[in-house]
Image (cartoon, helix red, strand yellow):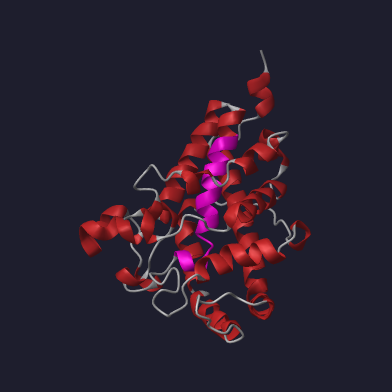
Amino acid sequence: MLLAALPLSAWGDKGHRLVCTLALEGLPPGPRAWYAGREAEVEEHASDPDHWRQDRKEGPRHYFDMEPYGGPGHLPRTLGEARARIGGDYYRKGVVPWIIQDRWRDLVEAFRSGDGARVALATSILSHYVADAHVPLHTTENHDGQLTDQRGIHSRWETGLVERFIRPGDLEAMPAEADPAFPDHTWDWLRASHALVPRLLEDDRKADRTTPRGKGGKRRTQAYWAIFWAKQGPVVKQQLQLAGRHLGDAILNAWIEAGKPSQVEFMKP
């Protein structure tokens, strides 16, 4: 039931790979050295959490519904506060901000271990949840348009548009920034993503007027995709680039928290 609450397919494989690429390209030389020759490895495992369906708790780790807490201005900052606010059902409302913090700490420990393979895998897993936090529909109970007669909007926005229109050269890597308060910024990302929901839904409705409803249901036309891309394409690009930047920030700050370890030092006999 928890897994049914949200499709585990945010951004699709292509989108998650792009976020990793952007993040690594934006790193300064110190942490970047840890990924030399492992770039494909990081990208390869970026979608792994979408396939952990044997873990019944995995679904809510990918999203965070804001409405049960009264909206973006009233979000809990701890799991204890979330439980106190809405009771034992809090987990099903999503826990991605805390999962990002947990996986970030995993990356810190990976850097401290000096194990390059461990660093690469920890980065991949962290990247997935960071990217998910930048999908607007991962911040609302109306995650698939089921409350507004727009079912399927989830995959149309985060996968359909990316697969059809995004090319690697369309996106620009942004430099990672050091920030001691980095772990607290996850809620800012989520609030910014949530602010995009109303326009996203309205743009889908406008584009959908080009698609007649047949006996077998709706099959979106080329006109739908062209209109939806014209309206939401810049938003999709923006969110992918921000996800890449924030993942880069996460990597850089994990490396700093770990004491700025040099891979060269760990390679000495």
- Among the 4 quarters of the image, the one containing residue 14: bottom right
> Which of the pair 82/166 is nearer the observer?
166
Relative to 117, does residue 201 appear above or below in the rendering?
Answer: below
**Residue 223 x %, y %:** 68, 80
Image mark count: 0
**Residue 221 x %, y %:** 64, 77
- Judged left or right of residue 260, residue 83 is left
Residue at left 47%, top 77%?
A: 150
> Which of the pair 61/75 is nearer the observer?
61
Residue at left 62%, top 50%?
A: 248
Residue at left 66%, top 12%?
A: 269
Residue that extends furthest to the front in the rendered view of this protein: 215
Relative to 8, does residue 150 appear above or below in the rendering?
Answer: below
For the N terminus, give its image quadrant: bottom left
**Residue 123 x %, y %:** 57, 41
Magenta-highlighted residues: 120-138
Relative to 39, does residue 117 appear above or below in the rendering?
Answer: above
